[in-house]
Image: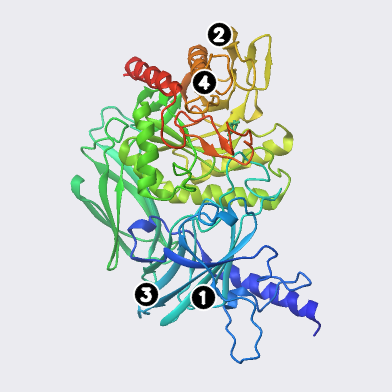
Amino acid sequence: MNRILKAVICFIVLSLGARAQEIPQIGNVLSREKISLNGNWNYIVDVQEEGYYDYRMNPTSWGFFLNSKPQRPEDLIEYDFDKAPQMQIPSDWNTKDERLFFYEGTVWFKKSFNYKKKQDKKVILYFSAVNYEAYVYLNGKLLGRHEGGFTAFNYDVTDKIKDGENFVIVKVDNKRKAENVPTQIFDWWNYGGITRDVFLVETQDVYIENYCFTLKKVQNTKQKFREIAFSVNLNQKLSGKTVEISFPELKLKQSYVTDSDGKISGVIKAKTLELWSPENPKLYAAELTLGNTTIKDEIGFRTIETKDKKIILNGKPIFLRGISIHEEKPNGGGRANSVEDAEKLLGWAKELGCNFVRLAHYPHNEYMVRTAEKMGLLVWSEIPVYWTIAWENPATLQNAKNQLKDMILRDQNRANVIIWSIANETPHGQARENFLSQLAQYAKNLDSTRLISMAMEVTSASNFHNKLQDNMNKYVDVISFNQYIGWYRDVNDAPKMTWEIPYNKPVIISEFGGGAKYGYHGEKNQRWTEEFQENLYIQNIAMLDKIDGFAGTTPWILKDFRSPRRVLNDIQDYYNRKGLFSDNGEKKKAFYIMKSWYEKKKQDWE
Ligand code: GCU
């Protein structure tokens, strides 16, 4: 059989085999019985993917994923993970190896570990995120290929994991491509690597895969109780399995039996219930038990809806005092991925007086969302359908849907998540609307309880009159758009501006702002000074307050962040300088303008 045919068959077998192992994302991994694979992994930088292709660019069946070692003195093996350097995982490679600061390509990672097989346990290999594409191998066998850099994925490795020594190898590739999500250009650093936690989860053969609790809106004001709608699904379509749900503080404990789909659903009545809100981020301990396994979570209960041009939280109109945030550690530390990172960044948002954060432009790590929930910060969560996406590519749409679904499945129990955002600054056109309308509908089908939005753009601005027109208006619950008056246009004309948003829906200004280098002072018309940024904020907030239906804003952005698009020496130095904080956590003058405005907004809306 010739080499080509052999390679093709091998590739097909590998691919088919790969799909067999990826399983639906298990919910609430943090509370599951698990072993962490975080720590030192060996890594090999593979610019030409020598470890994956032969010299004719055919996938090779004897690549780096075999972790081969010479058996005889004459054997030729041109790689050795155990002699390769080590990187502390989770992390991005850009900030861990200075040779890789700008690197876009393939890096192989290898982790050896010892495992004690247990008779009655299923084993799931769970990645919280790998940016951008991952091929995952266990003991030399391909488990699967995953695409998308900010959502979790997992494989059933029960039959492939050995009792004793094992090794997992991941081929990570962060090359930008037109058909990817995000596409080739985006204004943030392309941090590559195993950027979030890796776990070996041990479960029963039949386990609770995911679940969702939602507080129902009050139908009849006379009713003396609240209703919690719930659904729980097992990993198998098995009827007759007993699942117990309990909320000890609510003195609620009830058992249910799964249907033929392996699901239970229903409504739990609660006489007294403290609602989750930014002022009182109340969470209730929840326990879900199947057999001898109990999953613990903390659940908040609130309602979110819109009424005309108002956003209504727990039946009361709310103004969203927000800020946009990229998932980046301060002090040049690269991808944020821990509770400490979340507490630091969200602590700054609280200092600003926020009750809301826009986690841009991709789903952030789970610690960020859970920490925000505990701190009383509402969340806008977004998939990276950003700028010039390949609207007519079916695989691109499927990729966006996968990322949307995995974002929702992970965070559907977080009371503070109120908005799913499907896009940012996308160019109008029929293909874009076909693509985005399908995403909006898909999001609604997955979660009818939250608001759908996207960051639109002002389409016409002449004679100081700004009009927003976007055919996507009918697919979203909240009209959100980015505007950069004072920075990218009309530097001194904010006071003259009038606004027209012809839709009877609430309006969020999802971005406004301008750059300043911390410590650079001068006249307020001097670009890049703190005074310029401060004046821009003063002018913008006065202008925004005139917008009919103005229900909130998330200025761009909490802190300066790395971007390969920002190359102005001595000012940007590969940083986008629109932060209210410098990358080292120093507050710029505009911070205080925003803070005092939010204090007033808080009083006006209480
Ligand atoms: C855009 C975009 C951001 C970008 C910002 C900027 O609105 O959404 O991702 O960083 O503008 O130009 O700084």
CA distance separating discs 2 and 3? 65 Å
Q: Which residue is label 4 attached to?
A: 533
Marked residue nearer the N-terminal end (2 or 3): 3
If the image is split into quadrants, where does the N terminus sit? bottom right
Q: Nearer the viewer, mark 2 or mark 1?
A: 1
Q: Nearer the viewer, mark 4 or mark 3?
A: 4
Q: Which residue is label 2 attached to?
A: 495
SS at circle 2 = helix
CA distance separating discs 4 and 3? 57 Å
Marked residue nearer the N-terminal end (4 or 2): 2
Question: Which quadrant does ligand 1 occupy?
Answer: top right
Of 278 and 130, nearer the camera is: 130
* CB-based contact (under 8 Å), mark 4 and mark 2: no
Marked residue nearer the N-terminal end (2 or 1): 1
SS at circle 1 = helix
Percent of width and height locating residue 470: 65, 26
Q: Is residue 474 left or right of residue 23?
A: right
Q: Which residue is label 1 attached to?
A: 82
CA distance separating discs 4 and 2? 16 Å
Q: What residue is at 41 percent from the left and 82 percent from the top?
A: 164
Q: What residue is at 47 percent from the left and 58 percent from the top?
A: 25
The reply to whether residue 423 is visible in this rendering is: yes
SS at circle 3 = loop
